[in-house]
Structures are given as C-alpha cells and as structure tokens.
Amino acid sequence: MARWESADLRVETKPDRTFVTDADRAVESAIRALVETERPTDGFFGEETGVSGDSTRQWIIDPIDGTSNYLRGVPIWGTLIALAVDGEPVLGVVSAPALGMRWWAERGSGAWKSERGATPVQMRVSGVDSLDHASMSFQSIAQWRDAGRLSQLMALSERVWRDRGYGDVWPYMLLADGRVDIVAEFDVKPYDIAALFPIVEEAGGRITSADGAPGPWHGSVLASNGVLHDTVLSLIAM
C-alpha cells in the first residue's frame, strides 16, 4: 500500500509482455525473506524470483495479482500465498489491502474472510443448480479467443443467467462466498491460482483446469460451486 497510487511507481515490461512494478518485487522479497527465516527447509516459487529449494513443501507466491489494475489505480488486486505439499495446495491466503479484505483456508478448516480486521466469517459457495440461474465471470474475451475457445464462451454465456468480467482474483473470492457460481480463465501460471484451490474447495466448491485436470499446473482454471462443474466442463472442455 505504501506504493499504491504513488507518482513515482516504477513500471517495467517483462519478456512475456506483462507488467512488473517495484511494489511487486518488494512484496515478493519480503515474503521470501520471511519464509527463508521461518521455514528454511521449504521450497519457494515466486512470480518474480522463480523457484528455489528442493522440498515436498513449496510456498507459491504472486506478490500482486492484478498488477495492471494496481498501476492504473484500480483496487482489484491482491497478494496470493499458497503452501503446496507434494504438489497439492493445502493452504491459501488472498490479501486485498486496497479493499480492506482478506480470505484464507487450510485443508479441513473451512474457508474464511475478514473485512478490515473484523471478526472472521466462514464462507460457503452457492447452491445454484442450473445454468439459467447461474452468474459467471469469464475474465476476458481475449483469453478465451487466444485459447481457441471463444465459441465455447459464447455458448456458455447464452446458457447462464448473467456473465461479467470481474477479473483477476476477485471473482474467485466472490464464488467462494456464494455470490458468483462459475469462473474460468486461461493462460495462468501456478502462482496465479494455487492459493485459490484451498479457498474454493474448503468453501464447498470445485476447482480444476478448464479440461477437468486436478491442481494448478495446467495453464487454465475452472472454478464452480461444484454442482455446476460437470455441466460447464461439458461445454468448454476440449
């Protein structure tokens, strides 16, 4: 937050044409230093500093998910922290300080949210059981087009009650809290989505790749309230 909306924010373009700011690097550096101090034998996988360590336990970090929003002054961005054990995310934390929100989950302990430090509230996905009553977030049309699935997006959008492009980490938290029923995204890295898995699943939802594969390692993601998951997969999977 110290660099949020600062006039001298330093912005660079990485080789993959995504943006990185001095805030991204500072946040990841701080988290890495803490992990190295508190859990020195654990591995680390950060968006900005890559992979280090060789352990069955790996911290997966996106220091600012939604950097494009961050540098434009849009408050929909967050820090994503996941702990994976043997490749499976077992702990997820999403912190969105510009919104005053934090969400988290640990396997077997439920999914929780807290607004501006208030008493935590447990989250639960919706019980919507038909597409014509469902609210969907599709991230961006360009993602689906570039993935060769624009026709699938159009078909799905015609089946659901409403579709919105909320973007980045925000719609997954809305899904875990029962406010959105379907979220799908393409061209994602493990650090973009690993923290989402425990939160969505502990809230009672289901989260896979867009083709139904388990875990955050496949370059795409489909999250749902669980009831609708197989129906959506039948429409978008290739």
Image (cartoon, rainbow, N blue to C red):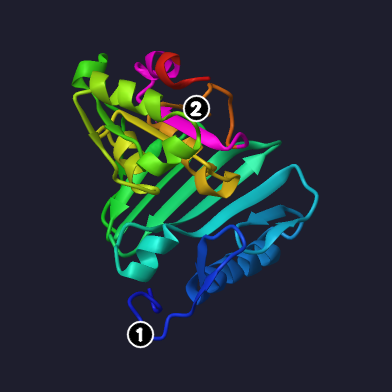
* Residue 224 belongs to the span the image colors magenta: yes
Q: What is the secondary structure assignment of the residue under circle 1?
A: loop
**Extreme residue in the bottom direction:** 8
Q: Which residues are magenta?
A: 217-233
Residue 102 to residue 27: above or below = above
Left or right of residue 204, residue 132 in this image: left
Task: Name the residue carrying label 2.
Answer: 210
Identify the residue shown where x is 64% and y is 69%.
Answer: 33
Alpha carbon distance from label 2 to label 1 = 39 Å
Count neighbours of disc 2 (C-alpha within 10 A) and say few if under 14, some if 14 to 19, many if 20 or more: many
Three-letter code for the amino acid on which mark 1 is drawn: Ala
Identify the residue shown where x is 45% and y is 28%.
Answer: 149
Residue 57 to residue 134: above or below = below
Q: What is the secondary structure assignment of the residue under circle 2?
A: loop
Determine whether label 2 and label 1 are within 8 Å by CB. Answer: no
Task: Name the residue carrying label 1.
Answer: 7
Residue 231 to residue 64: above or below = above
Res 163 quadrant in image: top left
Left or right of residue 115, residue 183 in this image: right
